[in-house]
Image (cartoon, grey):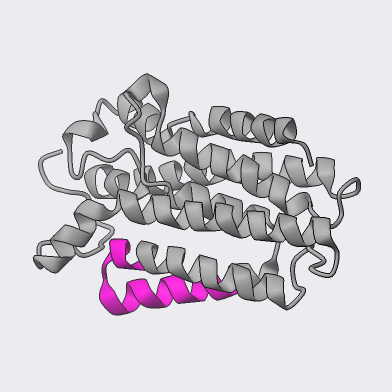
C-alpha cells in the first residue's frame, strides 16, 4: 500500500468533507449557524437553532459525505486488497472528517465531525459493530440527556470495539500476515485520531459539563431564531 494511495484517499475524502450541509442549509433558510447557538455547523446546533427537519437534513448530508465515498473506496479495493482494504476506507473517512471539521473556505471552522464519523463507521459495513455502537450511543444519550456525553462516549467505544473486533478476526485484517497486521495497527492509529479529534472538538462542552452549564438534548427549536 503506497504512501501516494493514502494521500489520494485523504485528499478525496477531504474534498467530500467540504460539503458543509449546515452552512448550506442555514444560508438557504437565512440563518447563519455561526451566529446562533453554539456557533457550530453540525447537526446538534442545526437541530437546536432551526428545528428537527434542519437537524435531520444536516445529519444526512454530513453522514453521506463520508459514507458514500467510503462505500466507493471499499468497492474499488476490496478485491485487490482483501486483507487491507478497510485501511483505505478509513483514510477516505478520515479525510472527510478533516474536511468537515476544517473547511478552508470557512476559515477552517466547521462541525465536530460526529455525523461524518458515523458515516465512516457504517461505511466499514460491519453490522455487529454498527449495532453495538448504536445501542451504546442511544443508551448514553437516553441516560444522560446530553448529546455531548453520548458523542464523547461513542468515540471511546469506537476505539475499544474496533480493536476488539480486529483482534478477534472480525475485520478484514489477517494478523498472522505481516503486511495485514501492520495495516491493522495503522488503522487503529487512524481510529484513535478520529476519536481524539472529535473529543478535542468537544472541549467547550466538557468545560460546560464540569460547570453544570451544558444544555440537555431536545428536539425543540430555540425561540427567537
Tell whether position 47 is magenta. Answer: no
Q: Quadrant of the N terminus?
A: top right
> Which residue: 59% across, 51% down?
120
The answer to whether one can see residue 214 in this image is no
Q: Nearer the viewer, residue 83 or 25?
A: 83
Identity of the residue drawn at 78% across and 63% down: 173
The secondary structure that most of the magenta stretch takes on is: helix
Residue 96, picture quadrant: top right
Residue 136 visible in the current orientation:
yes
Q: Say if 210 sits above or below 116 in the image.
A: below
The answer to whether residue 163 is left or right of residue 31 is: right
Residue occupying the point 79% across, 53% down: 84
Q: Position of residue 159 (x, y in %)?
A: 53, 66
Residue 194 drawn at (x, y percent): 49, 52
What is the quadrant of the C terminus in the image? top left
Q: Residue at x 79, y 62 (%)?
A: 172
Horizontal and vertical percent position of residue 23 = 35, 30
What is the span of residues highlighted in magenta in the rendered image?
131-150
Q: Is residue 88 left or right of residue 117?
A: right
Locate residue 121, reporting x and y percent. 59, 57
Q: Residue furthest top?
A: 105
Image height of 146 relative to 60, above or below: below
Relative to 118, residue 27 above or below: above
- Most extreme residue toward the right is 79
Amino acid at each position: 500500500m503506497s504512501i501516494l494511495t493514502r494521500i489520494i484517499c485523504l485528499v478525496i475524502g477531504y474534498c467530500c468533507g467540504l460539503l458543509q450541509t449546515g452552512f448550506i442549509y442555514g444560508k438557504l433558510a437565512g440563518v447563519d449557524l455561526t451566529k446562533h447557538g453554539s456557533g457550530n455547523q453540525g447537526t446538534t446546533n442545526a437541530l437546536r437553532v432551526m428545528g428537527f427537519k434542519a437537524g435531520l437534513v444536516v445529519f444526512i448530508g454530513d453522514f453521506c459525505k463520508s459514507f458514500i465515498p467510503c462505500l466507493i473506496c471499499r468497492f474499488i479495493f476490496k478485491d485487490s486488497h482483501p486483507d487491507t482494504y478497510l485501511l483505505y476506507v478509513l483514510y477516505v473517512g478520515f479525510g472527510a472528517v478533516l474536511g468537515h471539521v476544517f473547511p478552508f473556505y470557512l476559515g477552517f471552522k466547521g462541525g465536530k465531525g460526529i455525523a461524518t464519523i458515523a458515516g465512516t463507521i457504517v461505511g466499514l459495513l460491519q453490522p455487529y459493530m454498527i449495532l453495538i455502537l448504536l445501542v451504546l450511543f442511544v443508551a448514553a444519550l437516553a441516560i444522560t440527556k446530553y448529546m455531548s456525553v453520548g458523542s464523547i462516549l461513542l468515540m471511546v467505544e469506537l476505539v475499544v470495539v474496533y480493536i476488539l473486533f480486529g483482534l478477534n478476526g472480525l475485520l478484514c485484517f489477517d494478523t498472522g500476515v505481516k503486511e495485514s497486521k501492520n495495516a491493522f495497527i495503522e488503522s487503529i492509529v487512524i481510529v484513535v485520531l478520529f476519536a481524539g479529534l472529535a473529543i478535542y472538538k468537544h472541549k467547550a462542552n466538557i468545560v460546560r459539563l464540569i460547570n453544570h452549564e451544558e444544555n440537555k438534548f431536545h428536539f425543540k427549536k430555540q425561540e427567537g431564531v
